[in-house]
Image: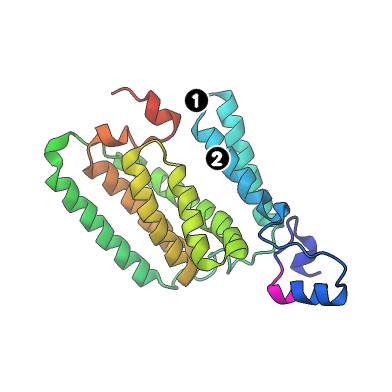
């Protein structure tokens, strides 16, 4: 059975398919894939759930929202028609040298910047006993950003516009932290562009983890509030 027939959310047709359908039945209106609300449903629903989770305090309701977000990410991914290759899961060596090399350069830049501004306040590095947990979370974030949001936005908007759109979603999830919002926008452009070029999730997860750890270890914690975002950033008290 073709993958398209099993997809919960139909794969967006190419322009040639739209033209063919209109030619076969010129009286039947053909809706643009960008304007069709059904094509935006997975993106809008999951993004809304993430933002609710970010802006509600820890507790039962927040836990339920997080579970719903995880469920729908997995549901739309499994039921979707994107291949493992399109999701960036099958070629761990593709572009790895370029991605890791560029990531190392960014780590060095942030480390040097942190050393220069060390007198602005103490940092709050993640303990090594928990660093691996952050690394797992960083890979999960890249899966959500690339294998869920980016691939769908790419189908709707095209590759280059999807880079910007996915980056804006990623950065907005870090509001109201000024430092993390700006850095996540810069990082988001890098992550999404590398994914667009190489379709490789794994080195992006490693770079994401390294950047998060060096940011926590290098920048003043009064800027980062223990790397919190949303309501957690506002409620933080040293």
Indicate the quadrant where residue 122 lies: top left
- Residue at (49% x, 34% y) in the render: 54
- In the figure, is residue 17 to the left or right of 139? right
- In the figure, is residue 48 to the left or right of 134? right
Q: Quadrant of the C terminus?
A: top left
Residue, far front: 27
Mark 2 secondary-structure assignment: helix
**Between marks 1 and 2, how big is the CA–CA gap?**
13 Å
Q: Which residue is mark 1?
A: 57
- Residue at (34% x, 47% y) in the render: 182
Q: Which residue is mark 2?
A: 50
Q: Quadrant of the N terminus?
A: bottom right
- Residue at (32% x, 53% y) in the render: 210
**Place of residue 119 in the rendered image (x, y in percent of width and height, measured from the top left):** 11, 37
Mark 1 secondary-structure assignment: loop
Q: Nearer the viewer, residue 176 or 191?
A: 176
- Residue at (78% x, 65% y) in the render: 30
- In the figure, is residue 199 to the left or right of 236? right
Is residue 40 rendered magenta in the image? Answer: no
Q: Around disc 2, counting alpha carbons within 10 Å, would you say few (fewer than 14), some (14 to 19), or many (20 or more)? A: some
**Place of residue 65 in the rendered image (x, y in percent of width and height, measured from the top left):** 60, 33
Q: Magenta part of the protein: which range? A: 13-17
**Place of residue 66 in the rendered image (x, y in percent of width and height, measured from the top left):** 57, 36
The numbered mark at residue 155 is: none
Indicate the quadrant where residue 223 lies: top left
**Place of residue 52 in the rendered image (x, y in percent of width and height, measured from the top left):** 56, 34
Chief SS of the magenta region: helix
Q: Residue 7, relative to residue 134: is it above or below?
A: below
Q: Around disc 1, counting alpha carbons within 10 Å, would you say few (fewer than 14), some (14 to 19), or many (20 or more)? A: some
């Amino acid at each position: 059975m073709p993958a398209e027939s099993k997809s919960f959310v139909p794969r967006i047709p190419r322009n040639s398919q739209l033209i063919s359908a209109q030619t076969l039945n010129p009286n039947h209106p053909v809706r643009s894939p960008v304007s069709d609300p059904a094509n935006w449903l997975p993106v809008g629903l999951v993004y809304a759930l993430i933002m609710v989770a970010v802006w509600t305090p820890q507790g039962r309701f927040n836990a339920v929202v997080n579970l719903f977000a995880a469920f729908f990410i997995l549901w739309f991914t499994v039921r979707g028609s994107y291949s493992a290759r399109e999701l960036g899961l099958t070629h761990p060596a593709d572009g790895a040298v370029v991605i890791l090399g560029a990531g190392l350069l960014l780590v060095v830049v942030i480390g040097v910047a942190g050393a220069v501004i060390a007198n602005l306040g103490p940092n709050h590095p993640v303990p090594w006993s928990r660093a691996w947990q952050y690394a797992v979370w960083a890979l999960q974030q890249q899966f959500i950003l690339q294998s869920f949001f980016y691939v769908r936005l790419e189908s709707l908007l095209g590759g280059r516009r999807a880079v910007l759109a996915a980056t804006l979603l990623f950065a907005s999830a870090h509001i109201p932290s000024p430092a993390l919002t700006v850095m996540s926008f810069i990082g988001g452009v890098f992550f999404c562009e590398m994914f667009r070029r190489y379709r490789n999730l794994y080195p992006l997860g490693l770079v994401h983890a390294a950047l998060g750890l060096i940011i926590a270890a290098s920048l003043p914690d009064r800027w980062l509030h223990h790397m919190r975002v949303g309501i957690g950033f506002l409620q933080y008290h040293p």
